[in-house]
Amino acid sequence: MKKNTTTATNSNLERKFLLIISIFFVVLMAAAWAFSINLRKTIVAKNSSAAVDTRALSEVERLRNISESEMSNSLSFFLMGSTSLFDTQKKEKQALAESLASFENKFSVGQVPEILKRIQTLTQQEQEFFDQGMQFRAKQTEPKIVGQFYRAKIAPIKSGINKALDEITAVHKAEMDRAQKKSEAAAHEAEALIPDAMILLTALLSALFAAMAFLVLRMHRQRASNINERNRLYQAAVKASLTRDGILSAVSQDLTDPLFAITEATTLLKTSLDATTFVNGVGLIDSAVALIDDRVKDILDETKAETENLTLRVEQIGLDAILDEAQLMLEPFAKQKDVRLEFYPVNPPVLAFIDRERVMRVLTNLIGNAIKFSPRQSKVIIKVRSDQQFVFISVKDNGPGIPDTQLHEIFNHYWQAPKTADQGAGINMAVVKSIVEAHSGAVTVESHMGHGSTFTISLPRRRPAGVLLRKSAPPAVRFKSTPPQEPKFIMDFSP
């Protein structure tokens, strides 16, 4: 409270100082008005000097080069008959005409317009002689004779154009000399007009302006700081609210299905004493509990990944065993959705250094989402390939696809598939990315609207640096089934 009171007091004092300085500033500006009238002559002289453009001299030489090149190429054309020379001289004629017009617009001083008209007349005469040469050429006249004719006719024209350009150069040099002398005279006059009082006035104005600028900037920075702090607090509150809503939405979407399966299975067990039904119901409850356990571990792993505390315990195992386990877990779900799972492992099987439990969750997430978003009577294809460094597992579905504008968002923490009956995936895809990248691998996605999506993960064939090596242990049982009997009760985990 005391800090806020001090800040308010300082702000009031700054406003008063700013008002006083503004009054002094106005008074000094009024006093300086008289001096500004005497300085107008200097400003006019400088403007007159600036009006003379030294580029005119280089432009004159460019016009001279274009003119000489055009006539030289025209003469060469009559002697050799080259089509390229004809095209070149034609372009140069056009360039010369455009350059003359541009020169008149930019550098028209003194007698320059009249001289340019003479040059244009000479170029027209040259064109007439060129046309006569073309007529002789059309009559099969010997090229040497045509060339001699054209050379004789353009000799005085060439001399006249060079003379005219020299005159333009002389006019501009004279104008530059005149402007230079006028500028020097104005500078001496301005030096005599500015007394010591003007220098003192300028210093006072500068000091007042600096003080005003300092106060204004100080007030502006204080205001900007207050606004930024308010915006920061507001954004933090909004972000916290969105994060909370995102967590609740993602978790509720991912836990709804297994909880519904448990409810249905327990209801069935209460109403049926059939042994097979009992076994299947218990199996469904085990599967649902395993899925809930996976989702809780997904959230914990994602939290650890954000804090860089995700620890892997890898072992070198064959991927066929994990794929078989994933198939066993998800086959009932696929049958209920009328979706066929097709696995294409490599032969012979490949080994990889992986954390078995976490990679199993990656596969169940990817394959489960593929089943969920695929239409009935379609198939989900799981392929395995490898190179010297990585094993690649791809999961392809026939779902609605993901829009290009959302491909970069699917691995966000709480992304959900929009406008579908089976919204979800939420935090799962973020966990997939975190686990795969913790293995020094990568996850990619290709999707086309109406043609499904393909997710591909890469897992290392060599032990990743900085991870713990798990001691050999039998694989954990994650899912129970009763083959070869067909379960009589299969619960659809999709919404």
Image: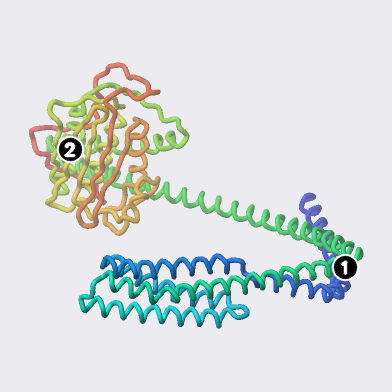
> Residue under circle 1?
192
Relative placement, left or right, of 453 versus 191 is: left
Give the amino acid type for the residue marked by disc 2 in the picture.
Answer: Lys
Q: Where is residue 69 in the image (x, y as percent from the top left)?
A: 41, 66
Which numbered tag is attached to residue 383? 2
Asked which secondary structure carries label 2, the reply is strand
Q: Residue at x 23, y 46 (%)?
A: 454
Mark 2–mark 1 contact, CB under 8 Å?
A: no
Residue 452 appears at what percent x and percent y? 21, 51
Residue lying furthest left: 484
Tell me which corner region of the image, top left, top right, bottom left or bottom right, holds residue 326: top left
Above or below 462: residue 489: below
Q: Is mark 1 on a helix, strand or loop?
A: helix
Given residues 250 and 227, the one toward you in this image is 227
Toward the viewer: 204 or 495? 204
Above-or-below relation of 203 to 178? above
Residue 27 on image: x %, y %:
88, 71
Name the residue nearer the viewer: 22 or 175.
175
Q: Which mark is residue 462?
A: none
Give how far across and how far down residue 356 sits, in percent. Answer: 28, 27
Q: Distance between the residues labelled 2 and 1?
A: 92 Å
Q: Is 299 displayed left or right of 212 in the figure?
A: left
Task: Judge by depth and name the residue closer to the eye, 93 or 330.
Answer: 93
Residue 383, quarter of picture: top left
**Amino acid type at image mark 1:** Ala
Few, some or many residues within 10 Å of mark 2 (<14, 14–19, 20+): some
